[in-house]
Amino acid sequence: MEWIILLLAIAIFIYFRTKTAKGVKNISTADLKNMLNDKSKQLIDVRTPGEYNTQHIVQFQNIPLDQLPSKVSKLDANREIIVICQSGMRSARAASILSKAGFTSVYNVKGGMSRWS
């Protein structure tokens, strides 16, 4: 019986960790390739400057996750925004921050740069 409760608790934890915020859409790197040259979109890489400098997609601006809350006012909440990180976890957090700040069209790149080729 205890292991059933433990499994249920783990399942609930995973559900809430992976649940996307309202208005956030998850996209694949293949989807991203079709959106890269759309100048109407804002493209934000939330990795550290070191990670960004090692490898990045040219169209993306680097705003590390820890700096995003203080820089969100410099972004246009009326334009679509795409966020990426290394694996998709930090960008999911960034997408949640943006959604709570009033951005209504936010895309999170699933798998992040680790899936980019």
Image (tube, helix red, strand yellow):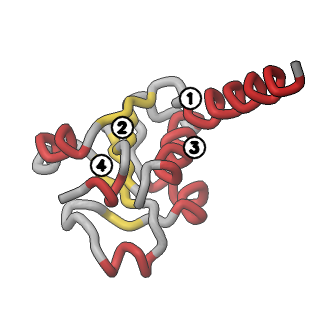
Packing grade of label 3 (10 A; few <14, some 14-19, many >=20) is some
- Amino acid carrying mark 1 in the image: Lys
The Cα–Cα distance between marks 3 and 1, rounded to whole angstroms, is 14 Å
- Amino acid carrying mark 2 in the image: Tyr
User: Which badge, 3 or 4, comes first in the chain's sequence?
Assistant: 4
Horizontal and vertical percent position of residue 79:
32, 38
Report helix, strand or loop for mark 4.
strand
Q: Give the labeled residue for mark 1.
A: 19
Q: Give the labeled residue for mark 4.
A: 42
Q: Are marks 3 and 1 in contact (CB under 8 Å)?
A: no
- Amino acid carrying mark 4 in the image: Gln
The Cα–Cα distance between marks 4 and 2, rounded to whole angstroms, is 10 Å
Residue 107, placed above or below residue 63: above
The Cα–Cα distance between marks 3 and 2, rounded to whole angstroms, is 12 Å
Q: Give the labeled residue for mark 3.
A: 97
In the foreground, 80 or 90: 90
